[in-house]
Amino acid sequence: MSRTVAALLRKELLVELRTLESVPAMSLFAVTTFVVFHFALNRSVVDGDLAAGILWVTLLFAAILGVNRLFVADADQGGFDAFLLAPVDRTAMLVAKVITLLAYLVVLELVAVPAFALLLLGPSIGDALPDLIGVLALGDLGVAVIGTLVAALAVRTRARDLLGPLLGLPLLVPIVIGGARATSPLLASVHPTAPAARWLLTLGLYDLVFGLIAYALFDFLLED
Amino acid sequence: MYGKGLRALSIATVAAMALALSLVFFYAPLDAEQGFLQKIFYLHVPLAIVALCGFVLGALLAIAHLRTRDPRWDMRSYVAIHMSLIFGVGALITGSIWAKGSWGHWWVWSEPTLVSFLIVFLLYATYQPLRFAIEDPERQARYASVFAITAGAFVPLNFMAVRLASAYVHPRVLGSTSNLPGPMALTFLVSLAAMALLYATLCKFELTAKHTRAQLRALRRRLLGEIPDTQARRPRSAAPTLQPGATVGTQAASRTAL
Amino acid sequence: MTAAIVLGDVPALPLHEAGKYVAAAYIVLFALMLVYLSIMAIRMSRIERELGELLEGTQRAAEQPPGAPEPDVQRESTLA
C-alpha cells in the first residue's frame, strides 16, 4: 500500500509542479485577503483574538480553493477509472490525496504566515513561531482530511464548486475553534503565552476521529 | 408494510403529548429565576435532543445501507434526517424565542446548544442539495450515506467543541438539564418522551406515504403498461424513491445486466 | 428551590411579558405540525386522484371488445 501511495503522491506533486494550478492561486488569494481585511476592518495592526481569527479564516478560505480542485483532474480526465482498474488498495488514493493537500497547505502557510506577519500582525512573530507551527500542523491535518473527504463527495455531482465549500465549512468549524483559540494567546501583544492544552487536544482528537471515518468511508465513494 | 404500527404509535403520541402539556402548565413549578418563561424549556430542549438523536439515527441507518446495499435503509436514513432537520428548525426557533425573552436578543452566542445547533443545521441543510446534484439513484444513495455517517459523527464532536469554546467566556444562559428538582425533572422526561414519540410517528407516517406512492406507481405500470405521466411532469426531487419489493438481488442483477 | 411557587397557589398566570414568548414558542410547534399535516393532505389527495384514474382506466379496458389486450387482473379473475 505504501508503494501505491508513493506512486500516487509522485504523480500528484509532478502534475502540480508542471501545471501550478492550485498552490500559487491559494497563496495569492491569502495575501490578497489580508489586504482586503486591512480595508474591511480599517486596521493597520491586529493582535490577539483578532489576529488569530484573520489568520485562520484566510487559511481556511484559501484551503477551500485547493479543495475544489483536488479531484477535478481525476474526475474529468478518467483518473478514477484508471485507478479503479489497478489491483491496489483503494484507500491509497485517500492517503495520497490527504498528503497532497497537506503539502499544498504547508506551502500556502510558508507564504501566508510571513505575509501576515509583515502586513497585519502587530506583535513580533519570532518567539511564537515554534508553537504556531505546531498548532498550524494539527489544524492542517484536520483540514486536509476533511477537505479530501468533502472534495471526493462533491466532485462527481452537478454543482461541485458549490457543494465542496457548503459541505466542508460546517465540518471545519471545530478546527477553526481549536486553531483560533490556540493561536490567539500566541499573538497577544501584551502577554504572549503558550496555547492552552485543551485546544491542542481538541484539534488532535478531531483529526483522529475524522481520519478514521474518512479511512472507513472513502472506498464507498469510488465504487464506480 | 410500513403503516402497521402507525395507529398505536399515533395514539401513544397524542396521549403523551397531552400528558406532557398538562404537566408543563399545571404541575411543574415556576422557575425561581426565569418565571413563566422557563416553560419554553420543556419544548426547546426535547426538540433539540430528539433532533440530535435523529441525526445520529440517520447515520446508523446509513451504515446499515452501506453494509447491506438495501435501498430501504437509505430511505429510512433520508426520512430520519429530513425529520430531524424539521425538528432542528423548531429547536432553533424556540431557542431564539427563549433567548429574546431572557436576554432581550433574538440570538445569543453564549448559549452553546443553540450555537452548535446552528452549525449542525447548516451542515445538514446541504444533505438535500447533495442528493439532488447526483442523478444516478444508486450513487446518490451511496454518497448520501457517506455524508450521513460523516455528519452523524460530527454532531457530538461539534457539541463538545462549541461547549469548550463558550465555557470559559460566559456561564450557561438558558439553563441546563442537570440538577432539576423532582417535579420539573418528571415534566421534562415526559416532554422528552412525547417529542420522541412524535418524531417516531411522523417518520413512520412519512415512510408509509412514500411507500404508498411507490405501490401506486407500480400498480399503474402493471395495469396500464405505461410510465405514469405524473412522473414526467413532476420535477426531479431529492428524495429517494422506493421500489416496492426491491431487494438487494434485483439491484445487483440490474447492475450486472448493464 | 427556595423561591419555587407551586402553580396552584398563584392566582393568575403572569401573562403580560413572559406569556407572549411561551405562547409564541408553542405556536411555532403547532404551526410546524400543521404545515406538515397540510403537505401530507395534499399528497393524499394526489394519491386519491391517481387511484381514481387507474380505476377508470381498468374499467375502460374491461368494457373493450374481447380480443383487445386485457390487463392481468381481469384474466386472473376468470381462471376460477
Image: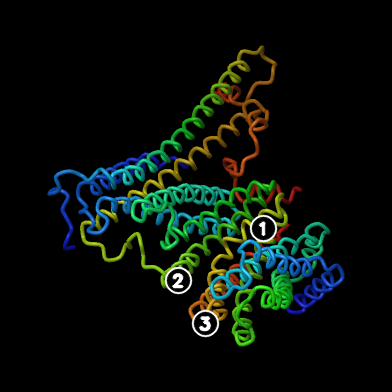
**Is C72 placed above or below A136 here?**
above
**Circle 2 — which element?**
helix
Real-space Cα separation, disc 1 to disc 3, in angstroms: 39 Å
| Residue A9 placement, left or right of B229 | right
Q: Residue furthest left?
A: C9
Q: Residue furthest right?
A: A18
Amino acid type of the residue that numbered disc 1 sits on in the rendered structure: Gly
Q: Are marks 3 and 2 in contact (CB under 8 Å)?
A: no
Q: Position of residue C56 (x, y in %)?
A: 58, 18
- Could you tell me which residue is drawn at 59 percent across and 45 percent down? B240
Q: Are marks 1 and 2 on the same chain?
A: no
**Circle 3 — which element?**
loop
- Could you tell me which residue is drawn at 18 percent across and 58 percent down? C4
Q: Are marks 1 and 3 in contact (CB under 8 Å)?
A: no
**Circle 1 — which element?**
helix
Q: Nearer the viewer, mark 1 or mark 2?
A: 2
- Residue B192 visible to an observer of this rendering: no
**Is B101 placed above or below B18 here?**
below
Q: Position of residue B193 (x, y in %)?
A: 33, 52
Q: Nearer the viewer, mark 1 or mark 3?
A: 3
Residue A164's mark? 1
Amino acid type of the residue that numbered disc 3 sits on in the rendered structure: Val
Circle 3 chain = A
Amino acid type of the residue that numbered disc 2 sits on in the rendered structure: Leu
Q: Are marks 1 and 2 in contact (CB under 8 Å)?
A: no
**Is B205 placed above or below B184 here?**
above
- Could you tell me which residue is drawn at 57 percent across and 37 percent down? B214
Real-space Cα separation, disc 1 to disc 2, in angstroms: 27 Å
Real-space Cα separation, disc 3 to disc 2, in angstroms: 24 Å
Residue A190's mark? 3
Q: Could you say which is closer to the camera, residue B225 or residue B123?
A: B123
